[in-house]
Image (cartoon, helix red, strand yellow):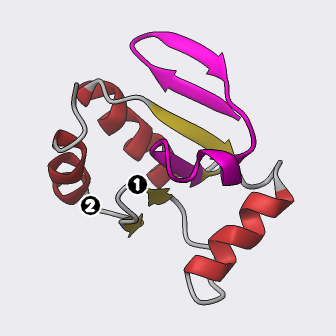
Amino acid sequence: MWLFGKKRRIEAPAHRAQRREAIILYGASWCGDCRRARRVFESVGVDYVYIDIDLDKEAEQYVFEINQGMRIMPTITFPDDTILAEPRDDILLKKLREFKP
């Protein structure tokens, strides 16, 4: 798991501990929609934690739980308890602007 933003890469603790403190993007390296969402994050300059659910089975199970048994990617959780599953760019941009430093 890594925290991305402002051209830095910091190892992040387990996703459950971070859930209330950070924006978390659950995805997979092969997922085109996940790569697109990560580009949106980078364009806005908002820090986030990226978790590859192919590598973290606990995180994968969490994605299944919050998406009614579906493995939807990207799934993005926010500190205000908002969850976006496979959001369009305009919806993600609007939400990220609330968190822009």
Label 2 Cα crowd, 10 Å radius (few <14 / some 14-19 / many 20+): few
Percent x, y for residue 86?
Answer: 41, 65
Q: Nearer the viewer, residue 31 or 97?
A: 97
Q: Secondary structure at mark 2?
A: loop
Q: Residue at x 39, y 13 (%)?
A: 6
Q: Residue furthest bottom?
A: 68
Label 1 Cα crowd, 10 Å radius (few <14 / some 14-19 / many 20+): some
Q: Secondary structure at mark 1?
A: loop
Q: Nearer the viewer, residue 11 or 81?
A: 81
Q: Is 36 located above or below residue 68 in the figure?
A: above
Image disc number at residue 78: 1
Which segment is the magenta one?
1-26
Q: Residue at x 22, y 31 (%)?
A: 100
Percent x, y for residue 101?
Answer: 22, 25
Q: Amino acid at mark 2?
A: Arg
Q: Is 12 located above or below residue 70 in the figure?
A: above
Percent x, y for residue 41?
Answer: 34, 35
Q: Amino acid at mark 1?
A: Phe
